[in-house]
Amino acid sequence: MVFTLGLFFFIWGLIEFLWGLKDGKVDENGKNHMVYGLVGMLIMVSVYGIISLIMNTFGIDLSTATDVSRVQNVNPGINFFGR
């Protein structure tokens, strides 16, 4: 979701930049938005890679985690209202 936000920021900066070229001026604001969008996407991809590296290094496999949503016959006990 955050990656999509970075992509949107980049596209918005590109639109601002191109709109400024139409008027015959170079818009620094559009350039800055494009750079910030690219930096944000680069950070998100780097974080994903670092997390993947850590998981592979320590052998962490989330697909073998216990799935508690399928536990049968669990009595939740008495709630706050005594029911």
Image: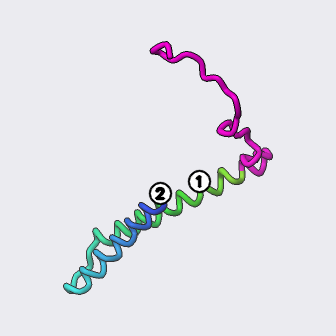
| x 33%, y 70%: residue | 12
Instruction: Please name whichever residue, 59 or 24, is drawn nearer the observer in this view of the structure.
Output: 59
Instruction: Give percent across and percent down for residue 53.
Output: 71, 53
Are the residues at dot 2 and dot 1 in contact (C-beta closer than 8 Å)? no
| x 49%, y 13%: residue | 82
Reply above or below: 24 against 32.
below
Answer left or right for 70 relative to 58. Answer: left
Instruction: Please name whichever residue, 16 or 8, is drawn nearer the observer in this view of the structure.
Output: 8
Instruction: Please name whichever residue, 32 or 44, is drawn nearer the observer in this view of the structure.
Output: 44
- Range covered by the magenta-colored residues: 54-83
Query: SS class of the residue under badge 1?
Result: helix
Instruction: Give percent across and percent down for residue 81.
Output: 45, 15
Q: Which mark is residue 1?
A: 2
Instruction: Please name whichever residue, 70 or 52, is drawn nearer the observer in this view of the structure.
Output: 70
Q: Which residue is mark 1?
A: 47
**Magenta region's main secondary structure?**
loop
Answer left or right for 47 relative to 27. Answer: right
Instruction: Give percent across and percent down for residue 51.
Output: 65, 50
